[in-house]
Amino acid sequence: MAGTPSLSSHEKWLCPPGFVLFEYALSVTPDAVGKKLGRIIQLFLKQTPRDLRTAATDFRALLITQEQIDIPPENIKYRAEGEDEPRQGAIEYTVNVSFQRSVPVGQFIQDLCLNPMNLDQKLKPFVTQALNIHANYNSRTSGNVVTLGSSKCFPLDDTTGSPDRGKHRGNHLGNHLGNHLVAKRGFFSSVRVATGRMLLNVNVSHAAFYQGEQLSALMNYFINESNLPVVEAHLAGVRVETTHIDEKPGESGMKRKNYVKTICGLANYQDGRGKKGLRNPPLVNGVGPNDVSFWFQAEGRYVSVSRYFISTYGKTPDRRLPVVNVGTRANPTYLPADFCKILPGQAFRKKLNESQTEKMVKFAVRGPSENFQAISQGLKTIGVNVEAGQAGAALTGLRGLNVRVSDKPIAVTGRVLDPPAVQYASGRKAKVENGGWSMARPLPKFTSGALLQNWKIAFLDAKGCDKDYVTQRLKSAMRGAGIRVESEPIVQDIRQRDLEASIKRAAQESANLVFFIFPPSLKHVYKDLKKYADTTYGVQTACCMSNKLKQPSWAYLHNLSLKINLKLGGNNHIVDPDSLDFIEEDQTMVVGIDVTHPSPGSSSEALSVAGVVASIDCRLGQWPGVLSTQKGGQEMVMNLKDMLKSRLLIWRKKGKHPDYPQNILVYRDGVSEGQYSIVLQKELPQIRSACQDLYPPSDTKKGLPHITIIVVGKRHNTRFYAQCDTNSGTSTDNVTNPPAGMVVDRGVTEMRNWDFFLQSHTPIQGTARPAHYFVIWDEIFRRASFNNQNRADKVQKITQSLCYMFGRATKAVSYCTPAYYADILCERARCYLRQHYEQSTTSGGTQEPPAPTSVGIHENLKDTMFYI
């Protein structure tokens, strides 16, 4: 457990004790939301006679000033971006500003540094909110920076590889993902409270963007590559700039009269129809400018889009390209694609396809030295400007008030935990190094090899595969690993159209396992295959690409054996009892909980799915799982009581325990910091209720079971960088990933909280991301029997050991196994709901199929690790 000096992706705030900010609420009438609301507030800041140059806003609800001032209501006539004057009949909005509170930032930071135990916790959200608004205000108002949400910003200039210099100029190149999308590298920033100091967390971020270009270029690509529904889905919500109106005198000389519009979709035969439709709806006989006509009031007749643009502007649209609707379905406005330019800096908020995801991952993966160097650029992007001779960096908007951010990342000291000993059959120990262990031949056998009888190998359109060779290699690998293969497989060739029938036949023949082998060109069948096997017919299946089995290495075949043994009920390895502490007493059930939600572009009826896995004994090898659907977007598990009861029953049945567990250790995945209290309010009572239904009164009187809930955070932005040479300062050239097993529980955490960061793994590539563990409820570790031992050390040691219990690999995983398995279980559920999670775009008027109300795993598999 030697101390390891590390640098963190955090900078320290420096602030005088008397510094105060003032918070005002913004309200707009009539109501406005989204981009329109932000535009109204932007116009208000320009129009108000008050000097608000040092103020900051979130362009939504709050205004933060550096002095208390009286701001009267202001009437704003709306004008869209690119308009010099409001249009005739423009809506007039009233912006009201009301004082809410003074925020003593300086005093709060001083108390945080000098007297943290007596810190006024009620001030914490107001201080962090005010500083976050100021910290992100520069990027939200800069002409060459695009913001996503409240904490991410992406520069559009040469510093990150794009030639954009100005908000609406240039071509947003970056890294091409396909379909005219580009990957962009930007920065995340957020103000955080730590023990004794206030921190600014800065980290590299990535996102996909539309390429700034003529809409016709994108249209030509899609017309050649895809169908119209795909084009419409891709463009919905995209903002374009018109280019068809000739130049006219403007505020800065001659310029083209350009308007910014948002694409609703392509022309559709339902446009202008329905209850709120037009008296004379458009006539849509196609999607080209010659095929779409609208009622031209000036002439009292229908005119095609093409004829209108020729006669009005003297410009002829390309008849091959679809026109876009930049109005609404009820009141459409059509523009030819030739006369629209996609504004750069627009994030692509829909789901990337598999190829695009691979390219995005490749683009995002960078070593720790590169990411560490990028943080200084991130500070400049968000408005932190380093000034020569100053002890820190000034924040734009707060310069001159001595409110500063340290220009160097903070240094923290971490401890490196010793890895647990990993054991196989006959007590054979693996040599653990850097978070993994090599599988030297002869391979060790699994601690508990499963029985395999009545199994099949199905070659799904796998031409060119040597079936005899593959069969013998698979049998040899499984037997060598300790799986008890007691029969020869039935080998068969099947066609894609016969996939479901082959699974049904395997179920009728009571097959223990069907091994499907298919070429990469058919990998899309995987999700349907799992749906048939897991939910409809109840057959254990394993899948592999045929190209992987032409000359398979023994390591690859061994990895296949790992999954098969778990599916059939075996245990692959164990860790030494000392590493698991009281779990080895076989009186603790470890639980993993996660929830998966519909992706952007999913059906409006798509449901969220909760997954719960739980250990059945102290060996921690088998983790059967259960699924339950709930309202889409709902993070709290609504049916947790029944789900946990099913795990407790399996604990007794499969674990062969006479009693229910005395301890329930829960690792809850996917919960944000703002939802911790909701877990205690909504999920903890369900856990208690499940136990009350099953545990005998004698146990409940003793206070059993003891429950501890630890939230596992993966999507945070804290990174640690180990210094290779501690004598060379904080140079960006001498940093690397910290070693596996490094834990940090001070420096970036609060003493009032029980949380820690653990980097349990060694990343294959890129910058390591530690997992963040937050104990939100504890009844296990605070017991009197642990009084003489450090509770924090126990939690960290057990959590690290659980990272080594992932049965599908021979290395520690990046976060603990129960949470990892729950995540995999939820991912499997997405296969069953593919029709709603990956909804194919259809033409207007097509009804969505009703979303299923449950995800039922077949009775044959529900007590197994079918999901692995």
Image (spheres, rainbow, N blue to C red):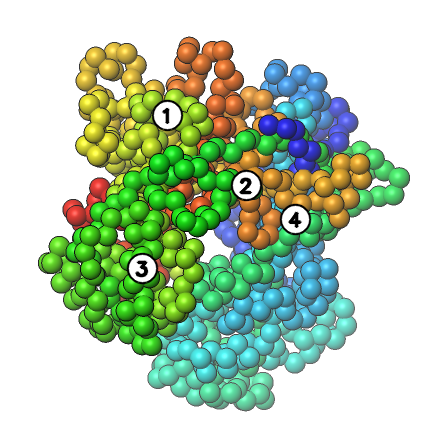
* Residue 414 in the image, given as x and y percentages of width and height: 63, 31
Label 1 SS: helix
Give the CA distance from mark 1 to mark 2: 24 Å
**Residue 336 seen from this side:** no
Q: Which mark is residue 344?
A: none
Visible residue check, residue 358: yes
Please state which of the two labelled residues, at mark 1 or mark 4, is closer to the viewer. Answer: 1
Residue 433 marker:
2
Q: Nearer the viewer, residue 362 or 806?
A: 806
Please say if the residues under marks 1 and 3 sit with CB atoms less than 8 Å apart. Answer: no
User: Secondary structure under badge 3?
Assistant: helix
Alpha-carbon neighbours of circle 1 within 10 Å: few (<14), some, or many (≥20)?
many
Residue most extreme to the front:
442
Name the residue type under label 3: Leu
Q: Residue furthest right?
A: 389
The residue at which mark 3 appears reads as 474
Does 592 sit above or below residue 321? Answer: above
Mark in front: 1 vs 2: 2
| For marks 1 and 4 on the same chain, the one whose residue lies earlier in the sequence | 4
Which residue lies under the disc numbered 1? 583
Q: Where does the image place residue 366, in percent across and percent down from the top left?
A: 62, 55
Judged left or right of residue 803, residue 696 is left
Quarter of the image where the N terminus is located: top right
Q: Which residue is mark 4?
A: 368
* Badge 4 or badge 3: first in the primary sequence: 4
Image side of residue 195 versus residue 712, left or right: right
Q: Please rate how many residues cluster around mark 2, counting C-alpha atoms within 10 Å: few if below 14, some from 14 to 19, many from 20.
A: few
Q: Is residue 17 left or right of residue 413?
A: right
